[in-house]
Amino acid sequence: MSVTAVIGSQWGDEGKGKAVDFLAEQMDYVARFNGGNNAGHTVINEFGTFKIHLVPSGIFAKNTIGLIGGGVVIDPQVLIDEIEMLNKAGIGVDGRLWISPRSHLIMPYHKILDGLYEEAKGAGATGTTRRGIGPVFADKVSYNGIRWSDFTSDVFESRLKMQLELKNKIIVALGGTTLDYESICAEYRGYYEKLKPYIRELFNIVQDGLKENKNFLLEQAMGTFLDTDWGTYPFVTASTTIPSAASAGLGIPPRHITRVIGVTKAYTTRVGAGPLPTEIHDTESEVYKKFGEVAATTGRVRRVGWLDLEIVRTAVQLSGVTELCLTKLDVLSGLDEIQVCTGYTMNGKDVRYADVDAYGLSEVKLTYKTVKGWSEDISKARSFDELPANAQNYVKMIEEAAEAPVKWIGVGPERDATIRR
């Protein structure tokens, strides 16, 4: 039996979907334990190209069972669309995808409030995806949430009425329009009927799997530095993103998580507001255009920066990362020189990420190291020895700084464009 957690060691968008996709073949269960459809995993394999937001990315392995834990908040229509997309593509999920009845639902008022709050904040906006994630987690911890388990009785109707009485007052106060109870009730009852065959208590599945020495792969949503506690608060997501969240969000005892894979992009990106110490601000530069990406969930252009080793090192220590998966190394090809941030100083003293808050992180001075790049196209490399010497040195530098071995190297978006060491 093994329980492996896959986490992002930066601000999300590290390429976790691809990592999970190729690791899933060895797994009995793949599971999501946190976040919601504000996360997007892009998977490219023999079935096609898929953008997954709620269903575990490892679902493409035909003998694997997918679990969506109670720590995940669910937009029902998004989940229904994903299930239909996967079934249409020939990836049958019926009978091998299970949703916890403890999962909280994203309601229409959550999405409306998400947008109204952002607009009300003005220049201080957090930069959310406006998917309703923050408001639904706020309702969860303030005893105002609605879960799948509420649909087995009249609890759903009574809780929806109460919530609309509360939420409509806030929506109107912020300039919005009131929501209608009857239409929402009918809509969500319809969602429940469609998803009812997939809703099942996961506790015994997880516990029996652990006893039977099954292999679990836990998929983190978002990234380490979007964590509510350890991220760049308040520019973070609304859930815990480090592996410990799997204990609450899925029911995995902490002692069973013995392997943590930190997915690390060869440079740094971030979507939305908040500090990005190594950010490249010259949007006309060759490097900015080379690193430029579009977010899978929102379609927003990602902010880009050089690799920040202090961020990676902190993520490794915080989550107990045992090995690294380095992605998008091929994107660096063609650069004569590559800048790498090796540390921070403030007021003439060395500081760590944990020594400053989000606002202080915007003020630290960066220590950069210039390393030699490479001109070769490495997208066809399938062994470490096939990489140019300077690319090999780049990987070794990351290993040394993070004090964790790089076991996989992504040299392209496809599943097989991976070097296994």
Image (spheres, rainbow, N blue to C red):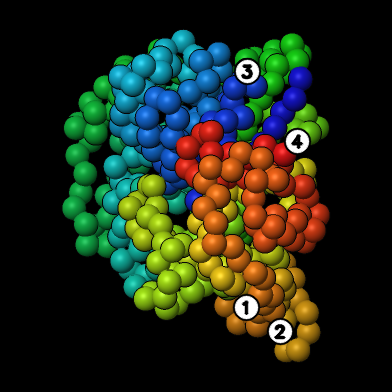
Which mark, by number, is residue 360? 1
SS for callout 2? strand
Q: Tell me the amino acid under the disc marked 2.
A: Met
SS for callout 4? strand
C-alpha span from label 1 to label 3:
44 Å
Q: Which label lies toward us, 1 or 3? A: 3
Instruction: Report whether residue 339 is seen.
Output: yes
Q: Which residue is mark 2?
A: 346
Query: Crowdedness of circle 2 by 10 Å Cα count: few (<14), some, many (20+)?
Result: some
Q: Which residue is mark 3?
A: 28
SS for callout 3? loop
Residue visible at 64% across and 50% down?
387
Instruction: Report whether residue 157 is seen.
Output: no
Q: What x and y, as percent, mark residue 129?
A: 38, 54
Residue visible at 51% across and 63% down?
334
Q: Tell me the amino acid under the disc marked 4.
A: Arg
C-alpha span from label 1 to label 4:
32 Å
Query: Crowdedness of circle 3 by 10 Å Cα count: few (<14), some, many (20+)?
Result: many
Q: Which label lies toward us, 4 or 2? A: 4
Residue visible at 53% across and 27% down?
58
Do labels 4 and 2 touch, CB within 8 Å?
no
C-alpha span from label 4 to label 3:
16 Å
Q: Which label lies toward us, 2 or 1? A: 2
In the picture as drawn, the residue positioned furthest to the bottom comes out as 347
Residue visible at 36% across and 16% down?
90
**Of callouts 2 and 1, the N-terminal one:** 2
Q: Which quadrant of the figure has residue 147?
A: top left
If the image is split into quadrants, where does the N terminus sit? top right
Q: Which residue is mark 4?
A: 259
